[in-house]
Image (spheres, rainbow, N blue to C red):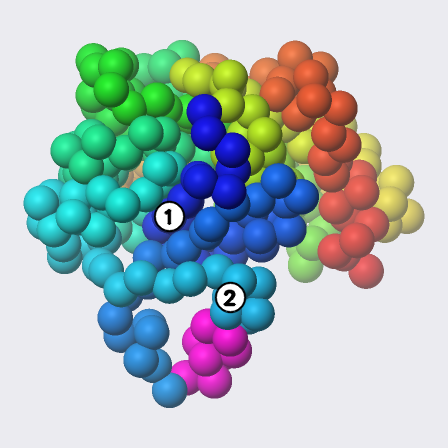
Amino acid sequence: MAATDNISVLVLGAGELGTAVLEALAAHPQRGSTTVLLRPSTMTSTDPAKQAQFASFQGMGISTLAGDVASGSEDELARLFRPFHTVVGCTGMTYPAGTQLKLARAVLAARVRRYLPWQFGVDYDVIGRDSSQGLFGEQLDVRDVLRGQSATEWVIVSTGMFTSFLFEEFFGVVDLAKGVVRALGRWDNRVTVTTPRDIGRVVAEIVWAAEEVGGVVFTAGDTVSYRQVADVVEKVLDRKFAREEWTDGMLEEELAKDPENGIKKYRAVFAKGSGVAWDAEKTFNAAKGMQLQGVEEWVKENIK
């Protein structure tokens, strides 16, 4: 691989994850050239928050490129991707089915040298195609496409869920308002979590300083059981929480009543406990000596 001065990186999306990745890419000591793909409407927006974000990117030396991941055709996206050495996908949660497959094919058509797709999550290979979460099948299709060729190097960074999701009321694990911690499946089920900021740091290290890395790699801010989550919350906040177990069967019944509910699909997947956790000691960040934020540190920083 050439020196990073000759590596140009395109990041797709500037949401919570995309922004964290962009900031880490720009801050890395071995950084090369970084560009972010934004919708044309975002680039011309008069919204103060979007203007401030745009100015922040410029201040970090990040270039911008207009393009629409959702509406752009495979050929149109390939033309946008072609000048870049590496493409990093950081968008997908709200996009139509088929978008991730379209992006993968556009990357290959563009002959991009290296691709990090939007798969910052669970181990889809282990979970398989029979999952209640339909998007997981498409993520496996993307893996099949990437594994079926050799022209473009690819890296999938498995991170588990965002640490903050454990504490989102809508997800149901830690309900601070009601003083309840719930286990998905069983109390001894484990879950791997990583913050977007730390995902950004790992991506930047892989992009700029780990050209030898390829295939599926794993990272972890923490891997904890739901019992440990409850213990940490009680310890840090110095108060008792009620504990409820949402069994696998119960969550499957809830999903059957509301089969299109995305959150209930995710709960059902995590309740099975398969493909959603791995040993933190056997991760990319552990091998590199990168200290990421654990659950206890996150609670101390974010919950008062």
Picture coordinates of residue 135 (x, y %)? 27, 34
State which quadrant residue 292 falls in.
top right
Picture coordinates of residue 156 (x, y %)? 42, 25
Residue 264 seen: no
Whole-angstrom CA distance, mark 1 to mark 2, is 13 Å
Q: Give the range drawn in magenta.
A: 47-55
Q: Is mark 1 on a helix, strand or loop?
A: strand
* Left or right of 68, for residue 214: right
- List the residue tagged with mark 1: 10
Choose between 108 and 243: the one closer to the eye.
108
Type of amino acid under label 1 = Leu
Type of amino acid under label 2 = Phe
Choose between 183 and 276: the one closer to the eye.
276
Relative to 204, is 67 above or below? below
Relative to 30, is 215 above or below? above
Name the residue at 39% across, 33% down.
Answer: 116
- Residue 57, which numbered label? 2
* Left or right of 156, for residue 201: right
Picture coordinates of residue 196 (x, y %)? 58, 46
* Left or right of 187, for residue 211: left
Choose between 99 and 299: the one closer to the eye.
99
Name the residue at 76% across, 56% down.
Answer: 303
Mark 1 neighbour density, 10 Å: few (under 14) some (14–19) many (20 or more): many
Residue 172 sits inside the magenta stretch: no
Residue 50 sits inside the magenta stretch: yes
Query: Is the C-beta separation of discs 1 and 2 under 8 Å?
Result: no
